[in-house]
Amino acid sequence: MLGAVGLTMTYGLSGFPNFAHAEFITLGAYIGYFVADQLGLGLPVAFIVAFLVSGIVAFLCYRGIFQPLAKRGATIIHLMVASIALGFILRHSIGAIWSWRPLYFTTSWPAFDLGPIRVTGLWLLLIFTAVTLAFVMHLILTRTKIGKAIRATSSNPELALASGINIDRVIWITWFVGGGLAAIAGIFRGADTQIWPMTGWDIILPMFAVVILGGIGNFYGAIAAAFIVGLAENIGVVALVALGLSTTYRMAIPFVILIITLIIKPQGLAMLFRRA
Amino acid sequence: MGLYFLDFLVFVGIFGIVALSLNLEFGFAGLANFGKVAFFLIGAYTYALLSQIGIPFSICLIVGALISALFGLLVSLPTLRLRVDYLAISVLAFGEILRLIVKSEDFAGGDWGISVAPAITIAGASPYVGVLVNIGLVYFCLLICFVVAQLLANSPYGRVVRAIRDDEVAAEALGKDRAKYRAQIFMIGSAMAGLAGGLYVQYLHYVLPGMFMPMVTFTVWIMVLLGGPGNNWGVLLGAVLVELFKYGTNLAKPILPIDPINLQYILFGVLIILVLFYRPQGLLKESPIKTKALELVKYGKGVVNNKASK
């Protein structure tokens, strides 16, 4: 969900799907690993550093590549191809620096039982962080000037520009925050499974399903959609096991949701949150 | 070394077919197919599975192309009326899922893949002859695809497709159903990719899920963008250049400081961004449409009179 929020915001504001978002996630996971495990500074510092680094990289990518391209009149297809190209550059640079061997966080998490369910501290932290960040984002989007500017730019860039909003700056800030949130998502993903250069790519497609189900550029839609897709995946896995199929097919569940959304209601859940 | 060069020619031929098919979709119809590898995969596995039960290679290739076309239609249908980015995302996802399916299913050999018999075997022939036969087969298919692509591009049909790419509202106002044309082009493109997939596995003699990473799609995109979208000669040139580059980095392996695979992908990424920045029309530009009407506008009535007097 954390990753999808950043993705949906940059998608909505810049008007193209950024496939390199996967690499912001991966980069965040590696920076987190580097700070927490190799430098031994602990997880809180890791979160902050990863947020900043990924955020700055995302900002630089937009400022250095996508914005000039868009100004030269590149079409949406060109921007998508550029984002994939950028993804390859980042992914293989990461691969060249840290090698392709998977890495694991050494932090161990206390596990305890809540009734029949076994819960780890990592999951609790993840849920806590996600809820807090969602709440903070909500406050920023509705209460602050920059939040209102982001929403204005997202719904009507020309009008926002005419009202004296510096839309370039708004988009830069969004890319920064989007990249930073992706980094947080990357650390959690890395701590839950493993870190390798494909960490981000492994979850980018479910994230696109979330973005499209939630309605492109729609913050609340993305949160609701993340719950739906996550729930559907877990129910789906149970169903797959019951049907005797391989659990590899869980990847197919977000895809099916994606296709169904496109057939029935391409604008996604956005109509439920019109004011967002 | 000679064998190495022939090998190179085969790959240029196979990826030339895929690049032509992407050029039809992207260059002429403006469709962003980010899942080219999916149709390549369908062709490859169809060929592998059918040839195992002893069906002659030509039928395997054709059936592979047809099944690819069918899937191309199914995948593109929900998204053809929407913006192009929806098509890009859903086709990309489709490719990834297909790869996972062939990886986890026993009938497709799982991680270990399937070994495939070559299309044409000549008893007692040297490897040279084998490769030469392959070159013949691949370039025969390439020629067919090229002719089809050229005919499509320079026909009234091709002009409608380009018109939809350039201004879909205007084209619809003239009564051209954009979803119908896009679906047809997507099917033809997918069929060509399927054909190339079949040729690919019969040349390599095996098929593995790992051969169908999203990188394959991206390589083909580089060929098209570098060579010149909308120009069939251009994309063939792009295919030659990209394959040359791949072979070059492989040859330079011992003298490179970092892993050539990483380096290769990084350079591909840089290359594509540079092309988008400085030469978005590619090395060879799309040629202007040639019709009688246009000549008339340009050169006045003389054209018609000259032709009549001959």
Image (spheres, rainbow, N blue to C red):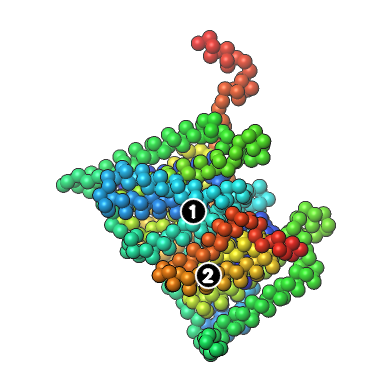
Task: Identify the mark at residue A195; answer none if there is no mark.
Answer: none
Q: Position of residue B76 (x, y in %)?
A: 53, 49
Relative image position of residue B180 (x, y in whole percent): 55, 41
Which residue is nearer to you in this view: B121 or B277?
Answer: B121
Query: On the image, numbered disc 1 is attached to which residue?
Result: B35
Q: Is residue B226 above or below residue B216?
A: above
Q: Residue at x 43, y 69 (%)?
A: A243
Q: Residue furthest top?
A: B309
Locate residue A261, reporting x and y percent. 60, 58
Residue pointed to by mark 2 = A233
Chain letter behind tag 2 = A
SS assignment at label 1:
loop
Q: Which three-letter amino acid code belongs to the residue tagged 1?
A: Gly
Instruction: Look at 62% across and 15% down and name the residue there.
Output: B301
- Toward the viewer: A126 or A145? A126
Give how far across and how far down residue A178 sits, in percent. 65, 67
In the image, taking residue A241 as reference, residue A60 lies left or right, namely right
Q: Tag 2: residue type?
A: Glu
